[in-house]
Amino acid sequence: MIPIMIMLVVTPAFSMDALRVGLLSDHPPISFTHNNTRQIRGIGVDIAVLLGRVMHAKVSFKMQPAQDLINSLNQGDIDLICFLPDSPAANQNYHFINTGITDMRRIFINSSCKTVTCYKDLSDKTVLLLSGDPHATELKQITGIRLVEVDTVLEALQRLENGSNNVFISQFESVSLYLIQKMKFKNISIVGVPIEKLPLGIIVKKGDTDILTNVSISFGKLVEKGSIEMVRNKWMGRKIYGDQWIKYSRYVIWGGVGATMIIALVGVWSFLLKQRVKKVTKDLARSRQHYRDLIESSPDMIFLVNSNGEILHANEHALHPALLDSSKDAVNIKDLVLQKEISAMQIFLNKIFHKGSASHEFRFQTSKLKNQEFEIAGRLINVSKVTDAQACLFARNITRRNRMEEELIQSERLATIGKMAASVAHEINNPIGIILANAEELTFNDQNAEDFEETIAAIERNATRAGKITERLMVLSSPQAFKEEPVDVQSLIEEGAALLGSSLKDVDYITSFPREKLTIQGDWASLQQVIVNLLLNSINSLNITSDPKKKKRIRITAQELQNIVRVVINDSGQGIPKKNLTRIFEPFFTSRKKGFGLGLFISRRIIEKHGGIIYVESMPGRCTNVFIEIPTNRA
């Protein structure tokens, strides 16, 4: 085979600092603003960006109606317009660079309207027209026609869809068809032949010779590379030529001349192809075996399942007798988990097959792995057909990790209680002092029956108060299994603050809750540990501030935002240095000499276990904001 050398000759591109481009507003697919991302998109945007790259210019956009774009071009606010249709009026004052892309002027009707197919049928009809349509004067000559101008194509199509009007003459067929498909309109039809073929182009003001030259040459380069045709195909579909035979006939003739030579080479090519196929087949088998060995040697359990949970394949570790019986033809992944977690497994599978990936913790019920905890992560594969869709699940035993985490949380609970010792002692001493005083008064003073009852009531009230403080302390300190139940957010925060008692006496402590009750699903003791820990951090930050005159303030607000409860803890302390802000949730990271660096790490693990997130914003020397967001329900 004779090697062929291709030489590319690159010509220097024209350069501009900036290119200001005007675009029609709300004209998809020519130019429009995406509803969700608010990005400017469309065929005009893509071509303008390509021009900017060739010209080494920074492209900026201005979106306006057609007449406003012409005014901006006249005033020098923009350098060019991309796209507008060609017209005699435009040719008098502007240069029109034809892009080779065309659109059609068409009639759209409500499907119930059966009497309109062309201009002559518009007599005595109410017709919608886009504001600034250059054909308005022509249409007014039709007898009895009533023209109604609308601001956008979408408004006109919505009127057709709901039957408010029956006829709309669209200047841009592609824009109307795009919106009909996007909005899923069912009651709109296109009738008749195209009224007019509109070449779309780039408009430059006469006199701007440099811009005209740069744009024309740069556009020519894009045409040569095929970039313009690619952009057109992207937004308006592939162009179909009716004269393919004529266009390529010379190649067919030369192909006939070379056919004899090709036939002679077929034998050689066939031999080489067979050799290539053998090599590729061998490489494919080797690669397949490599990946099979990789999966089989994995210490994790790997399952291939369908949307119903049926296990289609499992690696050697998953086929351990404690899990699966390899002699059975069909086993379901839901058979491995506890009975009460089967519904959660189905939700987990649905999430994978609808969103592409998911992860969750389950407990297995097999004989040798009973109540062992496993983290299962899954990802969707083979999505060419929905019926053949499969998911790959990776299961890892995390029982030991969870036990260590529980022990770590418990040790941090006890450490937190140690930090609160002075506050709790003060809170308990207050009611005990009152009880002793009243008991002493009962012992040594003569009282009438009424005073006697008041003294006993005071003793009972303060004993109850001391008991509740002790009860809260016991709940916070005792190790408990994670238990999900409805949690009143306001009560959770108020009881957490009550445990700190005297630690907050010198602090301007402010809370703000909505009138409606905020409830989340979670473990009360774990969540209260988070609140107490964050409040202790805020108090510590207030106590070590360098400005003694600075007002000490802690503000807690809670609100519900789109099925998420957000709690914000704000303090006026010294803040967190920017270099530490990304590390504060790392285990054993602390800026305090006597700290262990586990408080925020454990708080984040607890919040994540509730399906939420926790993050911090801080202004060093001024304040810190801690945000907690937890969903109100977790299906």
Image: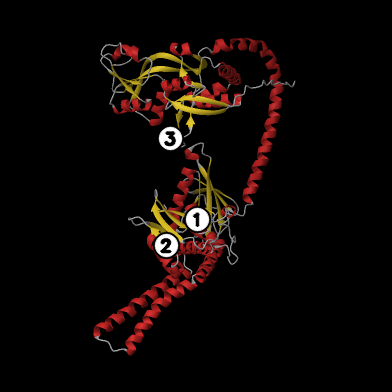
Q: Identify which amino acid the numbered label 1 is placed on.
A: Cys
Q: CA distance from mark 1 to mark 3?
A: 36 Å
Residue hosting label 1: 623
- Give the SS element for disc 2: strand
**For the residues bearing labels 1 and 3, Cβ distance under 8 angstroms:** no
**For the residues bearing labels 2 and 1, Cβ distance under 8 angstroms:** no
Q: CA distance from mark 2 to mark 3?
A: 43 Å
Q: Nearer the viewer, residue 245 or 534?
A: 534
Q: Earlier in the sequence, mark 2 or mark 3?
A: 3
- Give the SS element for disc 1: strand
Q: Which mark is residue 509?
A: 2
Local crowd size for mark 3, using a 10 Å CA cut-off: few (<14), some (14–19), many (≥20): few
- Disc nearest the viewer among 1 and 3: 1
The percent position of residue 528, horizontal first and vertical second, equals 45, 64
Instruction: State which quadrant residue 442 falls in.
Output: bottom left
Question: Which quarter shows the N terminus?
Answer: top right
The reply to whether residue 487 is visible in this rendering is no
- Count the marks: 3
- Up/down of 428 relative to 441, above or below: above
Q: Identify which amino acid the numbered label 3 is placed on.
A: Asn
Residue hosting label 3: 35
- Up/down of 226 relative to 573, above or below: above
The percent position of residue 138, horizontal first and vertical second, equals 34, 12
Q: Identify which amino acid the numbered label 2 is placed on.
A: Tyr
